[in-house]
Image: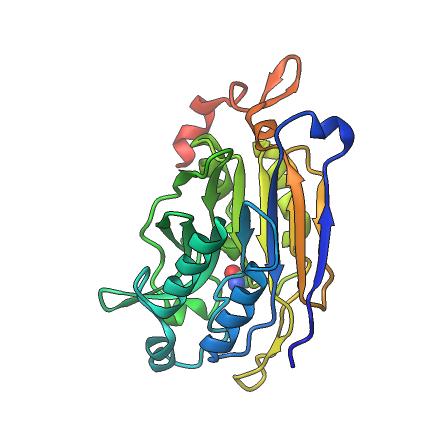
Amino acid sequence: MAKKPFIANRGLSSREKASHGIRVAFFQTTPIFGNIKTNVENVIAKIYSIDAHLLVLPELFNTGYQFKSEKEVSRLAEDIPKGYTSRRLIEAAKMKKIFLVAGIAEKYRGKFYNSSILVGPKGFIGIYRKAHLFWNEKRFFSPGNTPFEVYNIGPAKIGMMICFDWLFPEAARILAIKGADIICHPSNLVLPHCPQAMITRCLENRVFAITANRIGIEERIKKQRLRFIGQSEIVAPNGKILYRASGNREEIGIIEIDPKVARDKNITSLNNIFVDRRKKFYKPLI
Ligand code: ACM
């Protein structure tokens, strides 16, 4: 029987409670490679047990990460939103009246994408296809062809980026410029740097970020042992880590935040991070 995940709930301080908070969450999972039904149903069961407005799941949460061949990707990738995983997420989002962001291997017009879906109480909302593919992902997936988009989910505006996108500050920057309060960041991290780097991504853009990573090991290819580092986290616009998960257990982290905090881009009375940008000096680089 699957072990029960640790569930941590942390509320707002009494000062923060005066404002309008929403509960946001991540689920740090351990998928079994190729076992879509078990991986999806494990998550669906947990969705019904939590109280949150928004839940972020890891990258490729339904399939696992280390594909061996394009044939395997073809067998496991799904249509979004008509495939099994999307349909189960949509059902749960409608029943539970929750917004869900989840990483899925997507099959679209004969190509495969490492994608993220956003669904909510009214059903399917949007797709983001990973722009910056990591290592062997380049062998199986096409680079994303969707823009960095911002979606209104009621009290907050959210954007999606996937795992290795963290290394390209442009991803978070564009989402922030387009008005995202919260960056939803499904991940399968194997390098150690991202949990600390996301502090900077949040600080330099004054946004919240929810990084939902996985744990466990995959070694489906000889001498390519991948250990996923866990440490899923929710970081505030001032760079404060509101919640960071362990490196080795399934965990659901739930935090109450006020998304409006992300709309104040002033860092001192004389510094606004967007107004202060010296765009004319950046132009030649793009
Ligand atoms: C990664 O982008 N999955 C490291």
- The residue positioned farthest toward the right in the image shown: 14
**Which quadrant holds residue 49?**
bottom right
Residue 203 image position (x, y, % from top left)? 63, 34
**Which quadrant holds residue 67?**
bottom left
Residue found at x 38% / y 62% = 86
Q: Is residue 209 above or below residue 217?
A: above
Q: Is residue 210 above or below residue 277?
A: below
Residue found at x 59% / y 52% = 211
Residue found at x 47% / y 70% = 62
Quick one: quadrant of the N terminus? bottom right
Residue 234 image position (x, y, % from top left)? 65, 46
Residue 12 image position (x, y, % from top left)? 72, 36
In terms of depth relative to the viewer, which is nearer, 174 or 261? 261
In terms of depth relative to the viewer, which is nearer, 45 or 213? 45
Q: Is residue 61 above or below residue 231?
A: below
- The residue positioned farthest toward the top in the image shown: 270
Judge from the rendering whether residue 133 lies leftward or rightward of residue 58; answer left or right: left
Query: Which color mode does the image show?
Result: rainbow
